[in-house]
Amino acid sequence: MRIPFTKMQGAGNDFVVLDETRASYHLRPEHYRFLGDRRYGVGADQILTVRPATQPGVDFAYVIHNADGGEVEQCGNGARCFVRFVQEQGMTEKARIRVQVQHGVIELEALPDGSVTVDMGAPRFDHAALPFVPGSLMHRTVGQAELWQLPLSAGGRTDTVEVALVSMGNPHAVLLVDDVMNAPVEAVGRAVQALPAFPSSVNVGFLQVLDRGHVRLRVYERGAGETLACGTGACAAVVAGIRQGLLDPSVQVDALGGTLRIDWQGAESPVLMSGPATTVYHGEIDLPEHPWLPEVSKVAA
Ligand SMILES: N[C@H](CCC[C@H](N)C(=O)O)C(=O)O
């Protein structure tokens, strides 16, 4: 099956965008894995699909699959690319659109300077929202945040990391680090994701606070590994920092791949995210009915 796609990126988090507003391709997880593969397919952290809205007062539906083929609830950098895509494709005349995702509706606005602002909705902290199953894990309270002590066994040693938990529709565990560039992102990220406390896995953020309005962040994402930027991860990290009394309501987030701005007034207010969204190229790909990919474990990441 030959399908058109658009390659896009937001602060280095990259996407394959598919238009299913006229017809569905009826893709399976193996197809999304193939599209996301950087050797056999197009290569991307996530695959974003535009579908017709199924509820009133909404312009489009927005479906997200990680590179591992799994469908997920939300993608912030992808949302900015989503609105850029539907505008460039002439699918809407609006500068501000409402888009339905798994857990609700988000509002996206493309600004004249080329950046895009997204109302990502309010964060949630209840364990069911992630989900998080604490079992016998210990925690302490700092400011408004519960900080959970997670035992990680790596290399025969058991260390403990302390995380704040935030749901942006998708699950995030955020830990504070002194030097994000030397943080053991993959080792700790994988170990946290493997814990039974996270039955649906989790995105793991490594947050370095530079001052009350400026942070550095790296994220080991569920279903994609470390990405150059994570929009929902930036939202979750800033919310976690504000709740611990470390950050002001408006924060510049420096990710490896670019800069995002996150604003949150606390409590039930929505998290607002601003940042870049770029179309890289348009293409077509012959998608095999039964794509073959090597075992990831045998192939260097
Ligand atoms: N890996 C995430 C989805 C993509 C999030 C990220 N790319 C963003 O910009 O928010 C998850 O499994 O929840």
Image: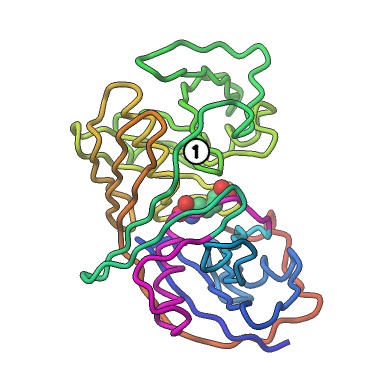
Residue 282 pos. (x, y %): 48, 85
Question: Looking at the picture, does residue 232 appear above or below residue 42?
Answer: above
Indicate whether 147 appears above or below 167: above
Q: Quadrant of the C terminus?
A: bottom right
- Where is residue 268, by image quadrant? top left
Q: From the top left corner, tell me how far across and down residue 11 is, in percent.
A: 35, 61
Per the image, is 71 magenta?
yes
**Residue name at image x 33 percent, y 21 percent:** 244
Q: Nearer the viewer, residue 230 or 245?
A: 245
User: Which residues are the magenta region?
Assistant: 70-99
Q: Residues within 10 Å of mark 1 (few under 14, many from 20)?
A: many
- Residue 254 inside the magenta-drawn segment: no
- Secondary structure beneath dot 1 equals strand
* Kind of residue at disc 1: Val
Q: Nearer the viewer, residue 29 or 250?
A: 250
| Left or right side of 65 for 125 | left
Question: Horizontally, is 95 left or right of 56 in the view?
Answer: left
Q: Relative to residue 165, is residue 70 drawn left or right?
A: right
Q: Position of residue 170 (x, y in %)?
A: 56, 43
At 56% from the left and 49% from the top, the residue drawn is 104
Residue underneath mark 1: 204
Q: From the image, which quarter does the N terminus lie in?
A: bottom right
Q: Residue 182, located in which quarter of the rendered image?
A: top left
What residue is rendered at 65% in x and 34% in y?
194
